[in-house]
Image (cartoon, rainbow, N blue to C red):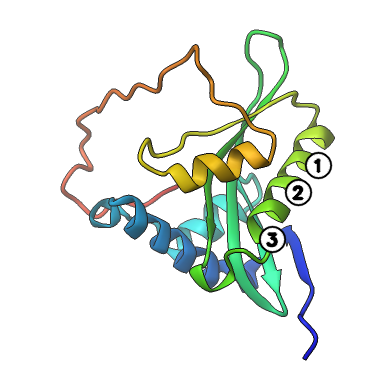
Amino acid sequence: MPVSPLTVRPFAQRDVADVLRLMRNLAVFEGYIDKFRVTEMDLIEHGLGDNPRFGVLVADLGGRVVGIAVHYVIPWTYDLKPTLVLKELFVDETARSLGAGAALIEALKRHAAAIGTPRIEWSVLASNEAAKRFYGRQGAILDAIWEPWTLLIQTEDDGKEASGV
């Protein structure tokens, strides 16, 4: 039986439920599902609206969305060039080892080149050795100079139903 071709494309309205499902699966994997608040409406409003705040590339295998690369752009930094930030990369367990992750990274690299950014940056869970090996195979290197830091801010929305990406 022939294998369906894998394609990578920007997400569309028809993909919203699948993108949300994969985002939720990543939140479970990374241990923050109890804080996850993104809804289908958020994805539509902030990702497909008139002024998108982020983009999503989807890996489509025979009409089934099996992977996502959620990304956004920092317009410029020290060199006056944009930085593409990969916020979330996730491939459904049933499609791992089929090339979806590598295809998403390749599409992200093409997107970065098209918008004139010389770099893509992201964070990896310190304990996720498989992801580190995968990213290394894609040509990425560990940034040995910078460490990720977080400053948590108490907001009025804390404890309430939040919306947004």
From the viewer's perspective, is 112 left or right of 121? right
User: Front-most of 125 and 150?
Assistant: 125
Q: Residue at x 75, y 35 (%)?
A: 112
Disc 2 on helix, strand or loop? helix
Q: Where does the N terminus fall, quadrant-wise?
A: bottom right
Under mark 3, the amino acid is: Gly
Q: Residue at x 70, y 79 (%)?
A: 63
Mark 3 vs mark 1: in front: 3
Residue 53 appears anywhere in the view: no
From the viewer's perspective, is 151 left or right of 142? left
Q: Quadrant of residue 81?
A: top right
Residue 148 appears anywhere in the view: yes
From the viewer's perspective, is 161 left or right of 71? left
Q: Residue furthest left?
A: 159
Disc 1 on helix, strand or loop? helix
Image mark for residue 99: 3
How far apart, in angstroms, are the residues tagged by discs 3 and 2?
12 Å
Residues at marks 2 and 1 touching, judged by CB atoms closer than 8 Å: yes
Under mark 2, the amino acid is: Ala
Q: Which residue is mark 1?
A: 110
- Across and down, in percent, residue 32 comes to 28, 51
Image mark for residue 63: none
Q: Which residue is mark 2?
A: 107
